[in-house]
Amino acid sequence: MRAVGVREPGGPAALRLVELPVPEPGPGEIRIRVRAAAVNPTDTVYRQLGPAPEEGLDPPWIPGMELAGTVDAVGDTSVAGTAPWSVGDRVMAIVMPRRRHGGAYAEQVVVPADAAAAIPDGIGDAEASTLPMNGLTVVSALAHLALPPGAVLGVTGAAGAVGGYAIELGRAAGLTVVADASAADEELVASLGADVVVRSSRDPREEVAAFRAAVPGGVDGLLDAAVLDAGALGIVRDGGALATVRFWDGPAERGIRVHPVRVRDHLHDGAGIARLADLVVRGRLTLRLAGTVPAAEAASAHERLEAGGVRGRLVLTF
Ligand SMILES: NC(=O)c1ccc[n+]([C@@H]2O[C@H](COP(=O)([O-])OP(=O)(O)OC[C@H]3O[C@@H](n4cnc5c(N)ncnc54)[C@H](OP(=O)(O)O)[C@@H]3O)[C@@H](O)[C@H]2O)c1
């Protein structure tokens, strides 16, 4: 089967079509004939750095953490708790690329049965592939922040994939959402339902000032999808909470609790993906597709993502 892999870490051109043996599902696993694999920032990091030596993984390394397609083989389902998938079911799934089987950029991918959720009728594979990883990331962040209804949630990087889901899931949880946007993204961020839109800036001091102008006491909790890390602390009120997405865990100040979000803690949360899909069906969550790119042209998708400004997700098709 064809996959997109990396033999030498590097720039987008490091992504090459590779031929790999068809993986076989073991007990409690399913194999998915992948039609769509979303292209995420974490994939560009994996392409650039490859796995750590202690991970013990041989090349080619296959990036990709979320996909959609059709179940084409089911492993031994007598394993306790295995979801009842059948060949032909349309599913989306979260997948960990740092493993022997590799990630989502492949024609056929084996995942634990509980990593998948059914794709509701009316949702295409490309759109569906944009939900599992970033949706679960935001669910995890909101669980860490543990804000009561009516509290103020701040979102940086709000025009991005994580940011957009944060606005919508924050609103669905009854939070007041204050989100940043460049002038070009203001309409987009407002259309996702942000209660207040503040002007984003590449200068963290200006970013903090914009949020403080809107919420002088500081927000109760912040999902920092723009990865300002320490630079984002000033947005948060004394004793508030900050969810970070690139593992920064402090030191903080003024009693602020810092929660690094790790979506890899949610690799068996197909049930969570199903709940997100239900919100999509009910019009509470928006799947944003920037475009599809044939898998053979994966390098161009990485180039576009790294150039910045892509709104919605680029998706590789197989
Ligand atoms: N830890 C985890 O488990 C986990 C899971 C999922 C995602 N993530 C991380 O979460 C981050 C966001 O992911 P994403 O998919 O939402 O990315 P994305 O779609 O590229 O969106 C990022 C957003 O942040 C903006 N931005 C970037 N740098 C900024 C800065 N210095 N100041 C203000 N705005 C800035 C971007 O604007 P431009 O496009 O104009 O640059 C864009 O609107 C990534 O770093 C990703 O790796 C972590």
Image (tube, rainbow, N blue to C red):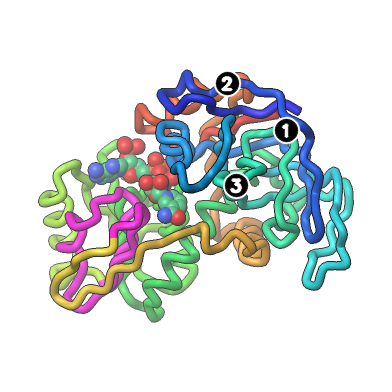
Disc marking residue 107: 1
Work out whether 296 lies above or below 194.
above
Residue at 36% of width from left, 33% of height from top?
A: 309
Q: In this image, 160 relative to 197: left or right?
A: right
> Mark 1 or mark 3, which is nearer to you?
3
Residue at 28% of width from left, 68% of height from top?
A: 258
Q: What residue type is labelled 2?
A: Arg
Mark 1 C-beta to ligand 1 under 8 Å: no
Give the x, y percent position of residue 208.
15, 56
SS under mark 3: loop
Q: What crowding class fits label 2: few (fewer than 14 Cα within 10 Å), some (14-19), or many (20 or more)?
A: some
Mark 3 or mark 2, which is nearer the start of the sequence? Answer: 2
Q: Can residue 241 be found in the magenta stretch?
A: yes
SS under mark 1: loop
Disc marking residue 16: 2
Q: Distance between the residues labelled 1 and 3?
A: 17 Å
SS under mark 2: strand
* Magenta span: 220-248
Residue 11 seen in render:
yes
- The quarter of the displayed image where residue 255 is located: bottom left
Mark 3 or mark 1, which is nearer the start of the sequence? Answer: 3
Residue at 79% of width from left, 66% of height from top?
A: 82
Give the x, y percent position of residue 44.
44, 34
Residue 191 seen in render:
no
